[in-house]
Image: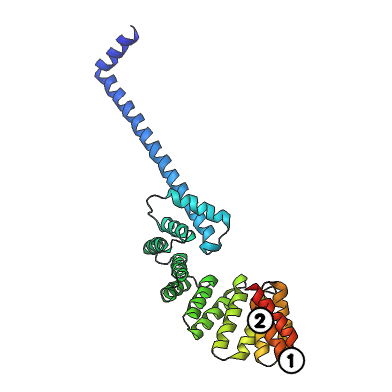
Amino acid sequence: MNVLEMWDYLIGNETFSALAIVFLLFFIFKSIYNSDQRKIEADKYEKKIKHLIVELAKPYQSDIAPENIKKEVRLLARKIQKPRTADDYFLKGYAYQMENNHLESTKHFEKAICRKPDFAEAYYGMGVAYQKIEKYHNAIPYYQQATMFKPDYTNAYFNLGYSHQEIGNRHEAIQSYQKAIGVKTDNLVAKAYNNMGIEFYGINNDVNALQSFQKAIVSDPDFAAAYNNLGYSNQVSGKPGKAIQYYQKAIDLKSDYANAYHNMGVAYGMLGNQTKADEYFEKAKSIH
């Protein structure tokens, strides 16, 4: 019996025909199952990658994130054609924010929040977007939400203080900066002390202003603006000689610091040394 005759026999035989169909169906379903499993595994892997990139991006405001993280966010965001999850929308919003497209970023952060109502970093992203377009009143409630869901969110407290500061809410700004300082020690602490000192001046609390600037330079010994402000604190309290020391430190740290040169001129003028005063005034003008 040749192969064709054997095939005709098997197909013609009801038992073998049924078995052939069963085996055929088995292999078809097995193939579909394996394909589905591979797709499920691929989806799981993709979700893990997205979540990993989100976790890497979370600690950074989009405009100051390390370049390698920015690159990964851009690549991944471009691949997400149809966002579905909170992480998808967060990555898209973050990518738009890096390109200064703040309108689109708010749309995507808002959708991330809809899918995950306690997504502190998405609230923070919303706050940053509004802050960048100088809508500080809009930014404030989002920073507040971010700190509610993440009580140790230093960046959110700092930006909350900055937003209050920009619209003249001095007491609220001071409170927010104090919370930023109280959370942990990092590169924002010195800035928070410095900004808080400025606000203390705004409410005529010169003693606390001076202390805040002193704490700023303790936190960051290379913070030129804090030395300049500390010099000004001494100058307005009638200590121009001491002020000059701080102005000089600010200039040493930042050689093109026009405001420090100008303040130095004022201090020398207070000491009666007009020649030196004019020298520093001219230097300040040349930088401008």
Crowding at label 2, few (<14), some or many (≥20) Cα neighbours within 10 Å?
many
Left or right of 105: which side holds 237? Answer: right
Q: Is residue 222 left or right of residue 99?
A: right
Residue at the limit of the structure toward the bottom, as seen here: 238
Q: Could you tell me which residue is drawn at 57 percent across and 87 percent down?
A: 200
Residue 221 falls left or right of residue 44: right
Q: Which residue is mark 1?
A: 272
Q: Earlier in the sequence, mark 2 or mark 1?
A: 2
Task: State which quarter of the image contains the N terminus.
Answer: top left
Give the amino acid at mark 1: Gly
Which element carries disc 2, helix, strand or loop?
Answer: helix
How far apart are the alpha carbons under marks 2 and 1? 15 Å
Toward the viewer: 253 or 176? Answer: 253
| Circle on res. 262 | 2
- Tell me where residue 181 sits by quadrant: bottom right
Residue 246 visible at all = no
Which image quadrant for residue 189? Answer: bottom right
Q: Pinpoint residue 262: horizontal percent, then vertical percent.
A: 66, 81
Front in this rendered view, residue 267 or 108: 267
Q: Position of residue 187 (x, y in %)?
A: 62, 70
